[in-house]
Image (cartoon, rainbow, N blue to C red):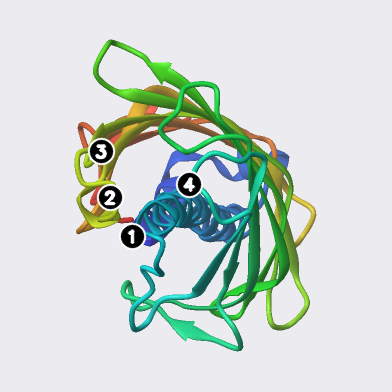
Amino acid sequence: MKKIIAPILLLLFISCEENDLKQVTEPTETIEALNEYALINKIFQDIGNTTGDAILNAEESTNTKKSTQSKNEPHITVEPFDLTTFPKTITVDFLDGTLCKDGITRKGIVTIVSNNWYGQEGSEHTTTFENYYHETYKVEGTHKVKNLGYSDGSHLKYSVTIEDGKITTDVGESITYREQSYRTWIAGSESPLNIWDDQYLLEGTQNGMNSRGLEYALSITDPLHFVLLPRGIESGILKIDIGEIKDIELNYTSSTITILGVTYPILIGN
């Protein structure tokens, strides 16, 4: 998402009359809010991927009765260590810092409580954090996932709820985040232990407050198509409200952005 920031700054200046700008959020504040939203969204989407991966690895380890851990991976423990007893607590310990395969250094503990395995319809998975850091950002909150079964007979669909989401920077600034969304797993389910070939559709809403107290809200009006390698969004439409600036539309399908009713072509990055 970082590549959209500079074009938005330019478009806000050329789309608004001077008097209009006085009545809405300062453009620089809007840019800051977008940057911070992009950051916190990326971190919590990453947590969703990490959580699912940990549960699948835990299932594999209890099935084979041996650890699946390899180099550059966290320590994963499962209690009770069997295939059938639930609820089950899965602890993912990144120790004092683990440089993972995706180049991200994570540290601290992620704890997942599951009432069944990830692929089972109706299964619920609640994730909490203990001194957990994504790079230099401390992560807090509760991440809940529920398996809703097969949405169209072939793709698993999950509801995702994030409550009290928060990241704190290394200089003490905090950004809050809430999410109510749905993820449909459209590719990669046939190789559950390899998350890098995964693709999914995301729909729903997200909102929060940036480090300066500016509120933001986002709704997905056409599902976002995520791929993990290379990481990106291939299509979909996102509606964004930041402060007093409403109805910013970011269209990944057509690579356009609409602000104050005017549409511009842009280069959309992730």
Q: Residues within 10 Å of mark 3 (few under 14, many from 20)?
A: some
Q: Residue flagged by tag 4: what amino acid is it?
A: Leu
Label 1 vs 3, first from the N-terminus: 1
**Are the residues flagged by discs 1 and 2 in contact, CB closer than 8 Å?**
yes
How many marks the image carries: the answer is 4
Q: Is residue 262 left or right of residue 169?
A: left
Q: Residue furthest bottom?
A: 96
* 120 in relation to 242, above or below: above
- At 20% from the left and 50% from the top, the residue drawn is 197
Q: Quadrant of residue 95?
A: bottom right
* Most foreground residue, 59 or 5: 59
Q: Is residue 100 left or right of residue 87?
A: left
- At 73% from the left and 82% from the top, the residue drawn is 171
Q: Which mark is residue 3?
A: 1
Q: Residue flagged by tag 2: what amino acid is it?
A: Ile
User: Where in the figure is residue 189, as x and y percent of width and height?
Assistant: 25, 38
Label 2 vs 3, first from the N-terminus: 3
Marks 2, 3: nearer the viewer: 3
Q: Residues within 10 Å of mark 1 (few under 14, many from 20)?
A: few
User: Where in the figure is residue 41, as x and y percent of width and height?
Assistant: 53, 51
Label 4 vs 3, first from the N-terminus: 4
User: Where in the figure is residue 159, as x and y percent of width and height?
Assistant: 53, 27
Q: Which residue is mark 4?
A: 12
**Mark 3: which secondary structure?**
loop
* 121 in relation to 177, above or below: above
Q: CA distance from mark 1 to mark 2?
A: 6 Å
Q: Which residue is mark 2?
A: 268
| Image quadrant where one finds the N terminus | bottom left
Label 2 vs 4, first from the N-terminus: 4
Q: Residue flagged by tag 1: what amino acid is it?
A: Lys
Q: Which residue is mark 3?
A: 189
User: Where in the figure is residue 268, as x and y percent of width and height?
Assistant: 28, 50
